[in-house]
Amino acid sequence: MSAESLQVHTLGQDEAAWEAFVAASADATFFHRAGWKRVIERAFGHRCYFLYATRDGRIEGILPLVHVHSRLFANALISTPFCVYGGVVADTAEAESALYADACQRARTLGVDYFESRERAPRHADWPRKDLYTTFRRELADNDEDNLKLIPRKQRAVVRKGINNGLSWTIDSTIDRLYPLYAYNLRSLGTPVFSRKYMRELLRVFGDDCDVLTVTHEGVPVAAVLNFYFRDQVLPYYSGAGASARDLKANDYLYWALMQHATARGARLFDFGRSKVDTGPYHFKRHWGFEPEPLAYEYYLSGLDSIPDISPNNPKYAMFIKAWQKLPLPITCLVGPWLSKDLG
């Protein structure tokens, strides 16, 4: 086998071989799935370059790439925007090197500011790295009783309060009850919402590997979360809660309900997703007994001298966030998707 026989291609319509590679690779994640190409192109209009390396007709590595070009935020190649994890998944060192080299060359050719690779662990010692995020992952037991025992005592008591408040849950196949709760929640945080079209595309493209769990109180939706399923993992991803959720302990009950539902589906790992270090969501997840695992977001700088800071923690966005929190909810739902599509 020679390096010369390795070829890098861009994914077209035929996704079967890519999906088979993801299914067979221990290092692949839900965010490496080919369906993200269709979701991102249809919902946001961004140009996708899903690269894969082959030798003798067999895939040896993949790298999902998206060009996010924004006048307000960034002009970048990202693996993968709107996702927690990214980067190359490869069977061979040659394929890994070829895919990263192609991405760097593509960044220069497109004239972007940088190529961002959302790695779970450091891979490029000479690339700048942002250590802003951690992820939270923990194994699940195969029954509800043991899973409840795995929740730390104080948090378990809060979950029981939610149960005693008469909350119940159901699984939805649409975002109709989730989206108003999600929009209300994000307006409160000062964050632009994603579009309904985007969430509908997620449900449409990923089918049975995506659903919505909704918590109700006396028949009224009070909290909900959109979830991904990958192998034996569950990944709660987009959530929302109404004004009464705090008093009802609905957010706490929500994730306990998801543990029950996911366990029944066969999930044995709960991926609580990323949070910024030392923020409210970060500490919320720790209260559930999850330990933070640092994420290594690495940057190949092709048009800048340093990593850009487009985090909401950047003081220059403070006034925008305060103003957004005061806007009427219908306005945030109208304007938010136009802004969020370029945040990545």
Image: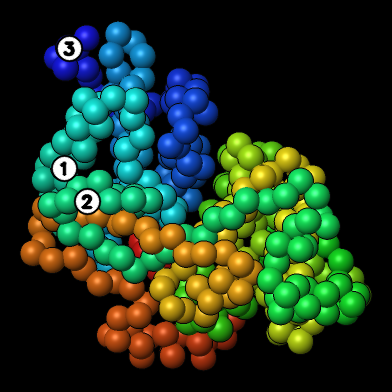
In front: mark 3 or mark 2? Answer: 3
Mark 1–mark 2 Cα distance, whole angstroms, equals 7 Å
The kind of residue tagged 2 is Phe
Mark before the other along the chain sequence, 3 or 1: 3
Q: Residue at x 10, y 57 (%)?
A: 303
Mark 3–mark 1 Cα distance, whole angstroms, equals 22 Å
Q: Position of residue 221 (x, y in %)?
A: 79, 71
Q: Residue 147 got which mark?
A: none
> Looking at the image, can residue 44 be seen?
no
Q: Is residue 51 left or right of residue 157?
A: left
Give SS at disc 3.
Answer: loop
> Where, by quadrant of the figure, is residue 338 drawn?
bottom left
Q: Mark 3 near mark 1, Cβ–Cβ under 8 Å?
A: no
Q: Residue 115 got which mark?
A: 2
The kind of residue tagged 1 is Cys
Q: Mark 1 near mark 2, Cβ–Cβ under 8 Å?
A: yes
Above or below residue 198? Residue 42 is above
The kind of residue tagged 3 is Ser
Give SS at disc 1.
Answer: helix
Q: Residue at x 43, y 78 (%)?
A: 278
Above or below residue 193? Residue 76 is above
Q: Residue at x 35, y 39 (%)?
A: 64
> Looking at the image, can residue 136 be seen?
yes
Q: Residue at x 35, y 80 (%)?
A: 313
Mark before the other along the chain sequence, 1 or 2: 1
Q: Quadrant of the C terminus?
A: bottom left
Most foreground residue, 322 or 161: 161
Q: Position of residue 33 (x, y in %)?
A: 48, 37
Q: Position of residue 292 (x, y in %)?
A: 47, 64
Mark before the other along the chain sequence, 3 or 2: 3
Q: Residue 104 got which mark?
A: 1
Q: Residue 2 got which mark?
A: 3
